[in-house]
Image (cartoon, coloured by chain):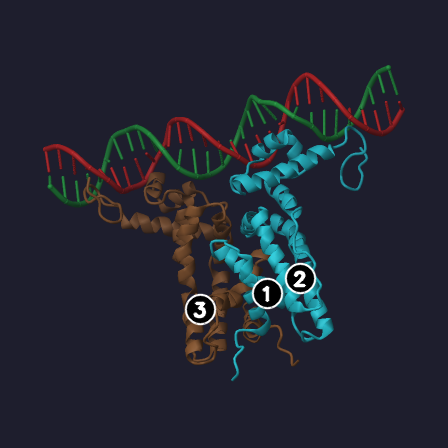
Chain colours: A cyan, B brown, C green, D red
Amino acid sequence: MRSNESGAPSTGRPRSEEAHKAILDATLDLLVEVGFSALTVEGVASRAGVGKATIYRRWPSKLPLVVEAFGQLPGFEDVDTGDLAKDLKRMLRGYLELFNSTPLSAVLPSLAGERSHNPELSELFEPVSKGRRQPLMRALQRAVERGELSRGLDLELSADLVVGPIAVALFFKGGRLDPSMVDPMVDLALTGLRDVPA
Amino acid sequence: MRSNESGAPSTGRPRSEEAHKAILDATLDLLVEVGFSALTVEGVASRAGVGKATIYRRWPSKLPLVVEAFGQLPGFEDVDTGDLAKDLKRMLRGYLELFNSTPLSAVLPSLAGERSHNPELSELFEPVSKGRRQPLMRALQRAVERGELSRGLDLELSADLVVGPIAVALFFKGGRLDPSMVDPMVDLALTGLRDVPA
DNA sequence: ATAATAACGAGACGTATAGTATCGTAATGA
DNA sequence: TCATTACGATACTATACGTCTCGTTATTAT
């Protein structure tokens, strides 16, 4: 019973890539249509035209499946205009537009909410979450290299500050995410509240 | 079959305040012990020593119950030192300490996650969420009146910026919320990223 | 070829829990 | 005293997770 590195055996019928993709697609479709909490594995199986076992053979439970489907959605697109404010505004605006055209705005809070009770999910989610921040971190890094930002700046904290208002809107307000909120948001994060002559 | 304004009839056996409180207390206890997703209505009924019907007579489903129990937890404590940075730091520090001593850090993401698929819950959550921000908003308002902040400042957005990094940590990172993160957070929000001489 | 192996779709199955309905009883107001 | 409603308890229906077994099909080893 030899196995290759991915844990799949080297003999017997191979797993169907087709079924794999159909499952992920069906999961995203249903996330859009019914949302996370109403999404059922049986529904995914039926939509994808596969048996439940075919799903559970690949993912130990519903959550990792949703995490992987979610991971296929796009994140920040990298923008490099040579000006930090422009970079941030374009990236965040594009991101908010994704929220209105994909299930991102519904899936993100659901998964984040589950994390707090599910350490395994938390671990699955971590690299995905981190990877999505990368373009943002790179834009900040470039600004430091250009001298636009101070060298001593905590870039992690800075990134949190920049996207913070989006997170607040997403989780604590109706979730209405108008791309027009981006410009004042970025401006305020760059200049700070205390932008008044003493 | 006359009813008073709260929907309860004016005749027959009145609803037990004792049972009401026991249910809310049991809900909070169980939120601490087992977390939100493992919390069951049957468990709450059993812990509170009431029948399930007594719960469903008051709350249409599990979520509004949890929202109301959650609403009993304390929020920001009002701090007025005459200095915005001090006010914010003390308030946020106290808030983060709440996260480590109550189920707040687990319940908040869960409820926020459910909101995106549940408009009714969203409406229930709205006033609670808004009320919790009040001390923060007042501190900002005072700073404007003292001339510490500019009059034209968007205070809603400012509040989002200040608490944003906490939201990001809570939802996108492990949820580790060390009160020591507060001081640099507030300082950065006040001065902005671009705090470097041009 | 033929055997061994493992994935396939379908769906039965056991368990858990949400929410409803029904019991006999207790408390209140007319 | 009687109507009304809440009470705790519990049976009930419906749903969905995750496991398992069916007969079948695709692939590899001999």
Q: Is residue B120 left or right of residue D1?
A: right
- Residue contact at pointers 1 and 2, CB within 8 angstroms: yes
Q: Provide the residue designation for mark 3.
A: B136
Q: Give the chain of mark 1.
A: A
Residue at 57% from the left image edge and 58% from the top image edge: B175
3D distance between C-alphas at marks 3 and 2: 28 Å
Residue A21 rendering spot, x and y as whole percentages: 69, 37
Q: Mark 2 or mark 1, which is nearer the start of the sequence?
A: 2
| Dot 3 and dot 2 within a common chain | no
Give the residue type at disc 1: Val
Q: Which mark is residue A20?
A: none
Q: Is residue B83 above or below residue A93?
A: below
Which chain hosts label 3? B
On whether disc 3 and disc 1 are found on a single subunit, the reply is no
Left or right side of B93 for A56: right
In the displayed image of the protein, which residue is found farthest to the bottom? A198
For residue A140, which quarter of the picture? bottom right
Residue A114 drawn above or below residue A144: above
| Residue B177 visible to the viewer | no
Q: Secondary structure at mark 3?
A: helix
Mark 1 to mark 2 CA distance (whole Å):
9 Å
| Chain of the residue displaying label 2 | A
Depth check: C26 or A117 in front? Answer: A117
**Which residue is labeled 2 in the image?**
A136
Q: Which residue is mark 1?
A: A162
Residue B147: x, y in percent? 45, 81
Percent position (x, y) of residue A5?
79, 42
